[in-house]
Amino acid sequence: MAASELIQDNDDCPVPLEVTFEAPEDGGGGGGGRPCKRGAERSRLLRCLPNALRRQRDYVTIAVPHERANQLPAEWWKTGVAFVYAVLNLLFTTVIITFVHERVPDKSVSPPLPDKFFDYVDRVPWAFNVTEVNGLVLVGLWFVQWIFLKHKSIIGRRCFFLIGTLYMYRCVTMYITTLPVPGKHMVCAPKLYNDSTGKIWRILRLISGGGLSLTGSHLMCGDFLYSGHTVMLTLSYLFITEYSPRRFWWYRWLCWLLSATGVVCILIGHEHYSVDVVIGYFVTTRVFWWYHTMANTHALRRAPNNLLSRTWWNPIFNFLERNVQSVVPVTFSWPIALPNGCTQRYSMMGGGREE
């Protein structure tokens, strides 16, 4: 495009110009006034040309993507609902244990059932203490790890929902089938029958001591099928493994050793039948894997042939996971605000999920 055409479109230069630059001739008298005329035209051209170029240039539109919606919203209120669900089921468990205790047959009338593990391994009195200590350590490790996870609200409500569901299942199995004590060494508190006040005090005592033998709060019998200690040992290990970086293999192996040792010590202490431990492990692992398969595979949620969606808790799952649109990464952050320098240094040490 010629300079005259550009200037013709410019409002500041309505008169078209045709400018020809020529070298000045030697000699001073022959040109007359032409050098001045050429200088005026040149200055006018230089003044109008930038404006004309700006008007004629082609604009390239660069689409700036809108900020992507948050695929991992915290939604702490849903975590609170899951927490209440877990607490209610734990409280309901203590009530069921109190009622089941009244139905446990006397040791002199119904001796312990045959158990293959008990046939080959004699009872070790202190073994069950190892189980409870390992369980407390695992729960403590998981709690500290959860505090430092970035997406702790999503992971927390998953943990609370699974705890509540597993203990609700346990209430059902305890209530419908009452097994005799697995060993004559077990000391069961006397039955209260129609003493409602005494039962309430037993429930409160069981809650205050966390249902542990170490605290002396668990003196009731009948909560055998299935093992609650197996549930907590297994579930703590599964969450620790699922939400820890793979490079922390030593940490995972340590937690596996604590969990496996605790489960075996339940049997060595003759505190549960072998079937209690097997069913507790089976139910805990399957429910954990089913839930996380649906949570991490988003195509399954609306697939018509997804048989996992036929579980009774699928509506609760949809409520908890509806807005979680991606796999939760394993990233860590400080639970409280820190100075920028410290936060920057810590972020360099944070780990992500390695798929």
Image (cartoon, grey):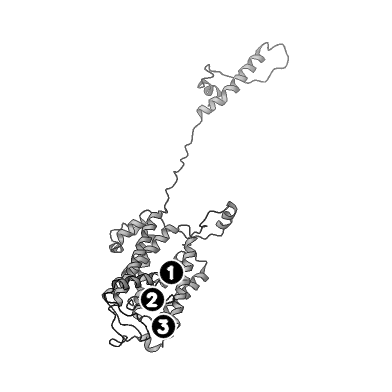
Q: Quadrant of residue 3?
A: top right
Mark 2: few/some/many CA within 10 Å (<14, 14-19, 20+): many
Mark 1: few/some/many CA within 10 Å (<14, 14-19, 20+): many
| Callout in the foreground (2, 3) | 2
Mark 3 lies on residue? 269
Can residue 41 be seen here? The reply is: yes
Q: Which mark is residue 69?
A: none
Instruction: Measuring from the top left, give residue 204's x and y in whole percent.
Output: 36, 69
Q: Quadrant of residue 278?
A: bottom left
Instruction: Measuring from the top left, give residue 16's x and y in whole percent.
Output: 53, 18
Mark 3: few/some/many CA within 10 Å (<14, 14-19, 20+): many
Instruction: Measuring from the top left, give residue 200's x and y in whole percent.
Output: 32, 70
Q: Nearer the viewer, residue 97 or 115?
A: 97
Mark 1 lies on residue? 236
Q: Nearer the viewer, residue 302 or 151?
A: 151
Residue type marked 3:
Gly
Mark 2 lies on residue? 218
Residue type marked 1:
Ser
Residue type marked 2:
His
| Callout in the foreground (2, 1) | 2
Query: Element type at marker 3?
Result: loop
**In contact (CB < 8 Å): disc 3 and disc 1:** no
